[in-house]
Image (spheres, coloured by chain):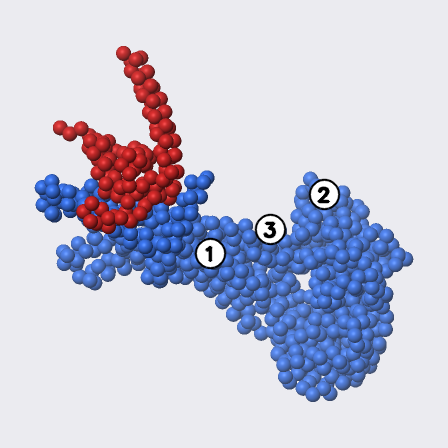
Chain colours: A blue, B red
Amino acid sequence: MSSRLRTFAAKLQGLLGKRDASAEFNDEVQTHLQLLEERFVRQGLSPADAAAAARRQFGNTTLLQEDRREMGTFAHFEGVLRDFRHALRTLWKSRAFAVVAIVTLALGIGASTAIFSLVDNILLEPFPYKDARRLMFLEIHDTQSNQAGERANYTSAELLEFGAANSVFDNTIGASEDLVLYQQGAGTEEMYGAHVTPGTFELFGMPALMGRVMQPADYEPGAPPVFVMRYKAWMTRFNGDPDILNKTFVLNGTPRTLIGIMPPRFGWFEADVMIPEKPVRGENGGFTGYPMRWFLLAHLKQGVSVRQAEASMDVIAHRLAAISPQDYPQHFTTRIKPLGYGVFGQFQTTLYTVLAAVLLLLLIACANVANLMLARATAREKEFALRAVLGAGRARLVRLLLIESVVLAMGGAALGTLLAWGGLKVFVAAIPPDVIPAESVIELNAPVLAFTLCLTALTVLTFGLVPALHAARRDPNDPLRDSGKGVAGAFRGGRFRNAVVVFEVATSLTLLIGAGLLMRSFVALREIHLGLLPDHVFQTYVRLPEDRYATGAQVAGFFRPLLQRIKALPGVVDATQASTVPPAGGRPAEMEISGQSHSEKWQALLQHCSEGYFRVLRIEFKEGRPFNEAEVNSVRKLAVVNETFVRKYFGTKDPIGSRVRLASLETLADPVRDPWFEIVGVVADVRNVDLQETVEPAVWVPYTVTGSGAQALMVRTVQEPASMMEAIRQEIWAADSGVAMAYPGALEDRISERMYAAPRFGFVVMAIFAGVGLLLVTVGVYSILAYATARKTQEIGIRMALGAERSNVLGLVIKAGLRLVLLGVGIGLAVSLALGRVIATHCGVLRLMIRPH
Amino acid sequence: METPRSEVLQGTLDLMILKTLHTLGPLHGFGIARRIEQVSENVLQLNEGTVYTSLLRLQQQGWIAATWGVSENNRKAKFYSITKRGLKQLARETEEWERISGVIGRVLRMEGERSS
């Protein structure tokens, strides 16, 4: 120990007086050499021979100096620092190489980490709930319809029956939506709420962040009214104020105590507030006067398969269908799907495809860097041979290269991490709403980042060391004599390298074509005419307190003066009431037409509106006229239908003056007696299902006929529609401070978000990957060809010596490269053709993801 | 015919230098090299440069000290002398060496008895 300490002290001294010591040592060695030389001269050698003999006897002075320095100083520390500086210098000298290598590494690391994090968070572990993989929902699938029109909402009676009669689920719960009004400041605000049934919080198994979740007693009739709030609503609407816990809020007219706030990742039904409710058989009073419907979620028992559960539930559903046949299709099956299915079910193929593409990119990046480093090694062979000849030991060479590789790897890692982090942010921002579950938190996946970093670092270090190992193992004279075979001996992979080029080109082409296809279908989507002009329209749903606005007259009493006042606002062109905001097309309603008989169900999408609706949306009239203000106010039973309606139900007959019966209006909380409506007009088709879906028959009736149903407001403005929001909100509150706006904004944004966001996301992601891929492949092909050509320097030299022209040589090199690239293009095209179908179906799939509200 | 020259055993150079300085008093590197050459009667093959590495090591351990002086033929030279700690170390190492060489000698003799 003490001897080590002494060495350390001596080294410290050496560090301080380094230059002196070095000079002194040199003097000493020189003196020694001279003395030896003199001695040899005395022995009779010629001065020249004597000098040589002296040097021979003394040995390698450079190595000695080095030894001395290492002993006299903290060799490792100093040596590493020196090598580090040297590495930076060398890399700076070959900046192009360094930049390309680092960027390649960074792209590989960044892209794969970002995408894998996305896939992991969205697909692998989206839900934080207890045993989330066994949480299932139920769908009734009409086997005769090929449209995606499954029913997943059930009456209270059905919910209770499904829950009680099955033996495959150990807990069955329901949730039904509600827009909840509460007083906030001068006016009223709205929150998205859910009525939840007993067992809900037991099913999810998540404790509250603050306060408590609901207990069985909270659901009992007569229990003190309570509610639970979601974290997001707490943060955005109450700034995370902890004092609101145990406060009482008046929600839709009922004072309720806030008993708990859920943790950030609790997102059941995307509800801001959860209100306890025990479903009661036969009870029918649902949201906005429509019948109450529950979404059913259940926990599959251990050991029960999805198929078993489907069979079991199908029996129950058919029994229920026998009791109330009007609620079920003629032929149906019951399907059970996992909780996340509705949101990302069809999205997962796209994500997995992208993931595969990205892993390929990572491999390509690694292969590229390996090739770059080999090419560089070939070029530096002589340098290393020279170093070895001049006395650099193998350890020194390895250290030098190791440090160079570490510098590269660190640069790549730093930039790659940054890219992964930034890229993920971009993706998260680009993800359309409703595509990922509210519960999933997308963050950088540390293990994946570590894995990609390790993989790339390993590649860099392995291939970085090749020249050192060779220079050290071989007779250093070989490369100096210019044998020209080079490092290639170690990496005898001509065929392998060619395969890599072909593979890279094919992959990149496939990605590019995929991106192109997606982009094309997106452009096609943008070109589909909606049938209305969505620009300069402000839209908002309006939530009216149900106790005061139950009848058509009451609702009209609110809207009639409000529409007048809004139309009088500066910057407003026109305003209308509506029951639905596009791109949603209304509620499907069964109907009959007088004088026409039919066996199958006749349906049309039903909307209520005021006379201004068609003007505000600039919907073209093909025949007849809209209802006018006087007719709306006097509750005339008139209807406007679309062209599809006429084509489907009237054929060539003139529909004007015919009467339709809308039976569903009879079952509302504010029913319409004798719901026969006279058709007064026919409008051009407006996309009412989805952009690529065929237009459904549609019918509009005056909103004054019933107080039930959702209420919305649409205003055509002169300026930017969103800028009118405050003025309109003030008008609404002036009319009734108990009314709230819900989802206000520009109609154009709403349509864009619902119709274009998902396909845009798909194509943007593919385009990014195709771009990254192309870049990597360019680097890859360059590095491989550069390496291959560098190895042929000798051959090229000989060819030129034998009279080959510059152009011959160029042709040779280019031909070799071109052959591989063309082969890659061929394979890429073939794969793309095969994948084209898959991608085309993806476009269809992306379409399905847009779910109108 | 020349007898093949032996390499200096690892670690023994330090001991030889200590002993040389102990016997002859302060010496410069060249002198040390000559002395080892003379004593070993050309049996040992010595890269004279390594003497300096060894000297540096010994200095770091504090077993020898160095001062600048003037050599016989009026050259500036560094003179090395053994320190008190160096003397102790020499005693220790000599003892150690004798012990080990004794053991090795015995072992080798044993081998000889048996094979004969």
| Type of amino acid at the residue the image marks with label 2 | Lys
What is the spatial separation of the Cα atoms under label 2 and label 1, in whole angstroms? 46 Å
Residue receiving disc 2: A301
| Type of amino acid at the residue the image marks with label 1 | Ala
x%, y% of residue A540? 71, 74
- Could you say whether the residue bearing mark 1 is in a helix, strand or loop? helix
| Residue for point 68% across, 49% down | A132
- Could you say whether the residue bearing mark 2 is in a helix, strand or loop? loop
Chain of the residue under label 1: A
Residue receiving disc 1: A413
Q: Are marks 1 and 3 on the same chain?
A: yes
Residue receiving disc 3: A124
> Which quarter shows the C terminus of chain A?
bottom right
Chain of the residue under label 3: A
Give the mark nearest the N terminus, 1 or 3.
Answer: 3
- Dot 2, how many residues are within 10 Å of its Cα: few (below 14), some (14-19), or many (20+)? some
x%, y% of residue A471? 29, 46
What is the spatial separation of the Cα atoms under label 1 and label 3, in whole angstroms? 26 Å
Q: Nearer the viewer, residue A801 or B91?
A: B91
